[in-house]
Amino acid sequence: MVKESRCNCLCFAEGAIGVISKRWSLLVINALGNHQVLRYGGLMKELDGISPKSLADTLTILCEEKLVRKESFAEIPPRVQYSLTDEGKRLRRAMQPLLQWALAKRLNAPAKCVPKYKKARAHILRGNSVPFSRSDIDTCSQSD
């Protein structure tokens, strides 16, 4: 149970909003949620259009915030894989009502992907807890 605060401000959310408002953060979280575990190259493919530096910076921030887990294996060549922490999974579930709201807001507009994210497969939610119908996802992924 969350303790009720005497403060009615949003100051406590400043750090969280700073992290999730980064351009690629939510897409990285969604890609890892869609696949459970991805290596760096897999994330690059999912996030078509992201630069290697932007991905590295985003992963560093998300790991520091304990939303993403980085697991390194002592192999040659070295292998690193990324997955969501429990907190990252909670954030992904928390994103879904916002996305539901955004989808409802767009119902009067043609269903088309935003051009800058169209090639990034990570912009599509997958999984059992997806609040959208399959046709919503199919329409988005097939639109021009």
Image (cartoon, grey):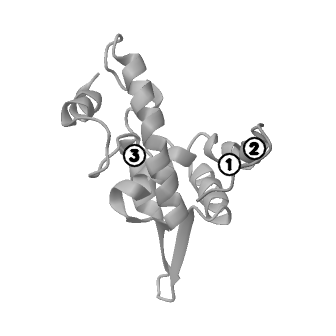
Image coords of residue 76 (percent x, y) = 47, 87
**Marks 2 & 1, CB-CB < 8 Å contact:** yes
**Residue 105 tag number:** none
Residue located 34% across and 10% down the image: 108
In front of the other: 118 or 134: 134
Report the quarter where the N terminus lies: bottom right
Indicate the amino acid at tag 2.
Glu
* Residue annotated with mark 1: 16
In the displayed structure, does residue 90 sit left or right of residue 13? left
Dot 2, crowdedness within 10 Å: few (<14), some or many (≥20)?
few
* Residue annotated with mark 3: 122
Examine the image and state in which quarter residue 64 appears.
bottom right
In the displayed structure, does residue 118 sit left or right of residue 71? left
In the displayed structure, does residue 83 sit left or right of residue 19? left
In front of the other: 59 or 17: 17
**Residue 14 tag number:** 2
Indicate the amino acid at tag 1.
Ala
**Mark 2 falls on what kind of element?**
helix
